[in-house]
Image (cartoon, grey):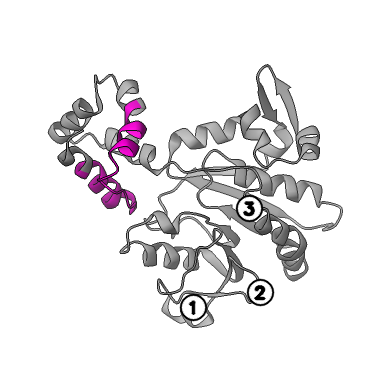
Amino acid sequence: MTPEDRELAAQICASRAGLLVDPEKAYFIESRLAPVARREGFGSVDDMLGDLRLKRDDRLAWSIVEALAAGETAFYRDRRPFALFETEILPTLARMRGGEPIRIWSAACGSGQEIYSLAMTVEDMRGQIPGAKIELFASDLSERALEKAQSGLYTQFEVQRGLPIGHLVRHFEKAEEMWVLSPRIRQMVRWRRINLIADLSTAGRFDVIFCRYVLAGLTPQMKPRLIENLARALSPDGFLVLGEGESVAGVSDAFQAVTGRPGLYARNPAFRAAA
């Protein structure tokens, strides 16, 4: 790939999704885009980007963005946010909401491990929160990731990464070389493709938003937009969960950290008037 090709790929990602892609990372860009080029029938990544320059194919441009946006995911990744969700966040909201629905959103769900981790937690907690009505939502920028997530099919390697053996036994069945999540858990989740830096006014209002390891991958200009979009989508007394080590400090004053709970944020009351 030429430097100009790498710059084009980086520009497409920044303009469409606010993604920060370093054009100097030639191996990363080419390795992510090579499967896209093969799938689209091009002889090389260079050929694909050359064609994109000429034809400005919107669908192809989004395929490039999706390929470069794909991140790492695993069941119960980092553990602590899920323990906090189980022991504090969900019981607290169940008491506060009474019989009103509690809406939970995995805002960058990838291939589904995060939202399914939350769904399994909710299912296993039914006896502790009787009468609570939980609604689970998941979104991602990538159509291909959403397709994989909705299938509920995972490899042995994927289920070994973070999934407790008890959860595997209770909620999965073997399907040849793969593991398939039970229909009961899959049917708990509603899916939608969402670009988080676009207008989220039609996304709805949520009580808990998991948006982990997205902030660090955005351009500096788009970080405040993401955080303020999420603040508008969160109920005034809801909770935002960011990734380990992520912070809104210096990005936006829309949220304030929950003391003693790393990665957990509540809406800044002052933001309500500005929203």
Magenta stretch, main secondary structure, is helix
Of the image marks 1 and 2, the number of the one nearer the N terminus: 2
Look at the image and tell me in which quarter the N terminus lies.
top left
Residue at left offset 54%, top offset 61% = 242
The stretch of residues the image draws in magenta is 7-34
Q: Amino acid at mark 3?
A: Asp
Residue 260, numbered circle: 2
Residue 49 horizontal/vertical position (percent)? 20, 32
Q: Nearer the viewer, mark 3 or mark 1?
A: 3
In the image, 59: left or right of 82? left
Between 123 and 103, which is closer to the camera in this rendering?
123
Would you name the residue on which mark 1 appears? Answer: 272
Q: Residues within 10 Å of mark 2 (few under 14, many from 20)?
A: few
Numbered mark located on residue 78 in the image: 3
Q: Residue at x 44, y 59 (%)?
A: 215
Point out the frontmost of discs 1 and 2: 2
N-terminal of the two: label 3 or label 1?
3
Query: Mark 1, residues whose alpha carbon is within 10 Å: few (<14), some, or many (≥20)?
Result: few
**How busy is the neighbourhood of tag 3: few (under 14 within 10 Å), some, or many (20 plus)?**
few
